[in-house]
Amino acid sequence: EAGVAQSPRYKIIEKRQSVAFWCNPISGHATLYWYQQILGQGPKLLIQFQNNGVVDDSQLPKDRFSAERLKGVDSTLKIQPAKLEDSAVYLCASSHKRESGLRTDTQYFGPGTRLTVL
Amino acid sequence: DAKTTQPNSMESNEEEPVHLPCNHSTISGTDYIHWYRQLPSQGPEYVIHGLTSNVNNRMASLAIAEDRKSSTLILHRATLRDAAVYYCILRAPYTGNQFYFGTGTSLTVIP
């Protein structure tokens, strides 16, 4: 089974520029998440989709960040304009609502995109 | 979501057992205890989870205190590939899939 795919793996931009990240979840997974992980910290949830609807975006800085999940499969996360403090690894994860009858909601993470804002 | 407390770092010799502790004194009766780990330059990966009883799988064992205020992830025989940051996470089963990661425990395995 293919894992969660993300691209690009690395991105370097200057502040005030725009950037977009792409995520392809595991086939059949209805729930998709975007996390931001700043160096030395644990991942922080930015947004959660259930199919193509937003379940939780309370931690998403909506003045500069946006995300969409068209057709309930792939997703893109955009930052416009970027700030220095946006330098981080952006992780995408996906999950089933239930697995084998257990409400485990195990999340499967992609390798992440490392963003550096200069 | 209830918070967890983990040591910032631990060391273990290769091929020896490792016990990674986690305190969660404010855990509620329905919170599941999840453990994930993050190897260098990779996304987190699932290790194990449990509710009340001790759990075993091919990767590790999870020992849960009787009062559920603490738990211990046990790696039975540490290898160099187990060097990672280990996160202990509490999650209520009915409030969505939000995972709140702390800073975790950075495990160093010494050859």
Image (cartoon, coloured by chain):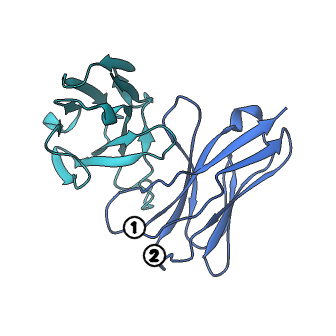
Q: Is residue A79 left or right of residue B98?
A: left
Element under disc 2: loop
Q: Chain of mark 2?
A: B
Identify the residue shown where x is 43% and y is 46%. A107
Q: Colour of chain B?
A: blue
Which residue is disc 1 drawn over?
Answer: B93
Task: Count the labels in the image.
Answer: 2
Q: Amino acid at mark 2?
A: Thr
Q: Amino acid at mark 1?
A: Pro
Q: Is residue B16 left or right of residue B30?
A: right
> Which of the marked residues, 1 or 2, is nearer the chain's N terminus?
2
Task: Find residue B22 and report its horizontal and vertical position in percent.
Answer: 63, 63
| Mark 1 touches mark 2? (CB < 8 Å) | yes
Q: Residues within 10 Å of mark 2 (few under 14, many from 20)?
A: few
Task: Find residue B36 and report its horizontal and vertical position in percent.
Answer: 55, 49
Task: Find residue B6 and report its horizontal and vertical position in percent.
Answer: 62, 59
For the C terminus of chain A, the image quarter is top left
Identify the residue shown where x is 64% and y is 52%. B8
Identify the residue shown where x is 43% and y is 60%. A101
**Front residue (pair A64, B81):** A64
